[in-house]
Image: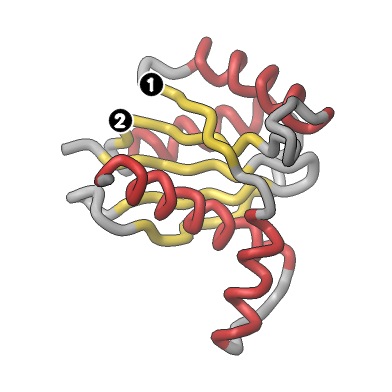
Amino acid sequence: MKRIMAIDFGKKRVGVAITDPLCTISQPLLTIRPKSVNDLIQRLKCIAVENDVGLIIVGNPISMKGEPTAMSREIERFTRRLKRHFDIRIELWDERYLSRYAVNKLKSTGLSVKKDVIDRVAASIMLDEYLQAKRA
């Protein structure tokens, strides 16, 4: 079984999470501060190959009305570029309020609320939500 990777895309930082080999739970992996989109894509390709990834979930921050936002349009452009470089399935996943939820979760557990940590925890939460939705 191939793993699933989640990407919480941001202009400055990109949070990455990955499932265990059985695709039952997620874990925050790292936060990338890419020099460019090409740099980001190359780093994501390395992570995908090293971890035998078969599916990538990219967070899509659509509005509360279900409409695209400026950032979701940017993420759609990024996802199209990603699809040209990967030979695996890539899906957009609704991530409304995900970063705020990640901050609250970190605060409630007493963990560091640094931006780099928030990004990878947000990716992990998104991946957990995806896994739960697919089990339902």
Q: Residue furthest right?
A: 70
Type of residue at label 1?
Arg
Q: Going by the image, does 14 lie left or right of 57?
A: right
The residue lying at 55 percent from left, 29 percent from top is: 42
Position of the N terminus, as image quadrant, is: top left
Quadrant of the rendered structure where residue 80 is?
Answer: top right
Labelled disc at residue 89: 1
Horizontal and vertical percent position of residue 101: 63, 64
Element type at marker 1?
strand
The residue lying at 53 percent from left, 49 percent from top is: 16
The residue lying at 40 percent from left, 44 percent from top is: 130
Residues tagged 2 and 1 counted as in contact (Cβ below 8 A): yes
Horizontal and vertical percent position of residue 51: 31, 43
Element type at marker 2?
strand
Position of the C terminus, as image quadrant, is: top left
The residue lying at 73 percent from left, 27 percent from top is: 67
Horizontal and vertical percent position of residue 36: 74, 31
Q: For the residue carrying disc 2, how many other residues have a C-alpha within 10 Å: few (<14), some (14-19), or many (20+)?
A: some
Q: Earlier in the sequence, mark 2 or mark 1?
A: 2
Q: Going by the image, does 57 lie left or right of 119?
A: left
**Which residue is tagged 2?**
54
